Image: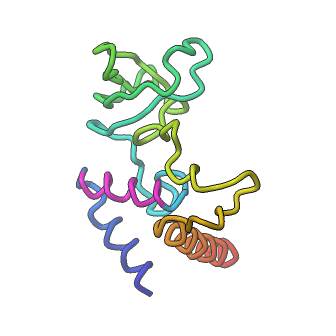
Amino acid sequence: GALEALRRAVRQHGEDAEVVELATDIEGLLGVTPGVWFGLDPLRPGAVVHLRSMRGAPHLEGAVGLLESYEEASGRWAVSLMEDEEVKFLLKENLVAGLPPSDDSEGEDYKEEGGKPRPEESPPWWAAAMASARAAVGARTMAGARHE
């Protein structure tokens, strides 16, 4: 169907940095791990990333940077950090494509405890759209997994 055609088209143009960025954004909106749904590695020079699992440097947790280059010998990415204007050499496991989730988590303010919308407010339009998209992706992912 249309979703499979989209996946094929994105993979066909997977060397285009803008296509990879768009695919990564779509995967983020769908709530899936970047690279999983479209099959493209979002970690490439010029990509925006944020840092995670920084046990040795907890002050860098969530820091945002740009990938500069991959060092084959060390297996690390050169990441130019935005705030420090410093370059760190980090393992892939410490990098997540895109910006970190915001602390104020859009949409959380309309929920009461238990996750139900308050009677006087309706959830934003995108909440229903995201739930629908996630369900469609989940169904397709499960169907694909059964055929492999």
Residue 20 lies, with reference to residue 103, above or below; the image says below
Q: Position of residue 132 (x, y in %)?
A: 55, 74
Please name whichever residue, 141 or 145, is drawn nearer the observer in this view of the structure: 141
Give me the residue at 44% from left, 63% from top: 38
Quadrant of the rendering where the N terminus is positioned: bottom left
Residue 147 located left or right of residue 94: right
Q: From this view, report whether residue 65 is shown above or below residue 44.
A: above
Which quarter of the figure has residue 136?
bottom right
- List x then y, in percent, for residue 145: 66, 71
Q: Is residue 85 left or right of residue 132?
A: left
Please tell me whether residue 84 is drawn above or below residue 5 in the rendered image: above
Q: Is residue 98 magenta?
A: no
Q: Main secondary structure of the magenta part?
A: helix
Residue farthest toward the right in the current orientation of the protein: 114
Is 67 above or below relative to 9? above
Q: Residue furthest bottom?
A: 1
Colour convention of the picture: rainbow
Front residue of this view, candidates 63 and 42 = 63
Which image quarter is the C terminus in? bottom right
The structure residue drawn at horizontal position 54% and vertical position 52%, both measured from the top left corner, is: 33
Verify whether residue 21 appears in magenta: yes
How far from the left and from the top, in percent, is residue 20?
32, 54
Name which residue lies at 59% across and 12% down: 56
Kindly identify the residue that appears in the image at 74 percent across and 51 percent down: 113
The region drawn magenta spans 18-29
- Can you give x and y, in whole percent of width and height, for residue 134 in the image? 57, 68
